[in-house]
Image (cartoon, grey):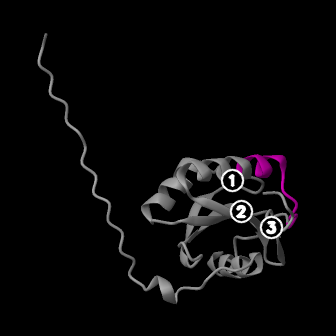
Amino acid sequence: MENVNYQVAEIEISYRPKFKVAEQPKVTSSDMAFKILLRSWDAGRIELLEEFKVVLLSRQNRVLGVVDISRGGFSDVVTDPKVIFSIALKSCASSLIVSHNHPSGELRPSAADILLTSKLVSGGQILGITVHDHLIVSPYGYFSFKDEDMM
C-alpha cells in the first residue's frame, strides 16, 4: 500500500473589533433596528434596487455592524444563507436581524421572503445564532416578521 501524506489546513480564529462593543447601540425593538438599517441604505437606491442587509449583534444585542449581503434588480435579490452565516461566524455574532427592501414600497412579504426566513431561522438554530427578526424596509416604514408573529 502506498504511503499518502495529507495536508490539513490550519485556521486561526481571531476577532478584535476596532471599537468597544459596550458603546454600540443595543437593539431593543424592531423600530430601533429599522432606524439603524435605514441609516445604512443609500437613499437613491432604496426605491430602485432590491438589497439584502444583515445587522450583526453581540450576546447583549449590541450592534457589531451592518453588512451588505447582496444587491438585485427591481423585484428580487438572490440571498445565499451560507454567505450570511459565514459573515456572522467570522464576526463572532451571537444573533442577527436580516432585512431587505421592496422598491415597490409594498411591505407585505412574498412567499419567497417567508421561505427564506424559515431557512435562516433553521440554519441559525443549528449554528447557535439566533435570527431575531426579518424586516422588509422602505423609506416610509417597515414590516417585521417578529412583530407579526411570523417567526
User: Residue 46 colored magenta?
Assistant: no
| Circles 2, 3 touching at the beta carbon (< 8 Å) | no
Q: Which residue is mark 3?
A: 144
Which label belongs to residue 77? 1
Q: Quadrant of residue 104?
A: bottom right
Identify which amino acid the numbered label 3 is placed on: Ser
Locate the N terminus by quadrant.
top left
Mark 1, residues whose alpha carbon is within 10 Å: few (<14), some, or many (≥20)? some
Which of the two marks, 2 or 3, is nearer to us in this view?
3
Mark before the other along the chain sequence, 3 or 1: 1
Which of the two marks, 3 or 1, is nearer to us in this view?
3
Observer able to see residue 61 = yes
Mark 3, residues whose alpha carbon is within 10 Å: few (<14), some, or many (≥20)? many
Q: CA distance from mark 3 to mark 1?
A: 18 Å
Which residue occupies 73% across, 77% down?
34
| Circles 1, 2 touching at the beta carbon (< 8 Å) | no
Which label belongs to residue 49? 2
Which of the two marks, 1 or 2, is nearer to us in this view?
1
Please state the extent of the stretch shown in magenta in the rendering.
Answer: 105-116
Q: How many numbered dots are placed on residues in this image?
A: 3
User: Residue 113 colored magenta?
Assistant: yes
Which residue occupies 72% across, 82% down?
32
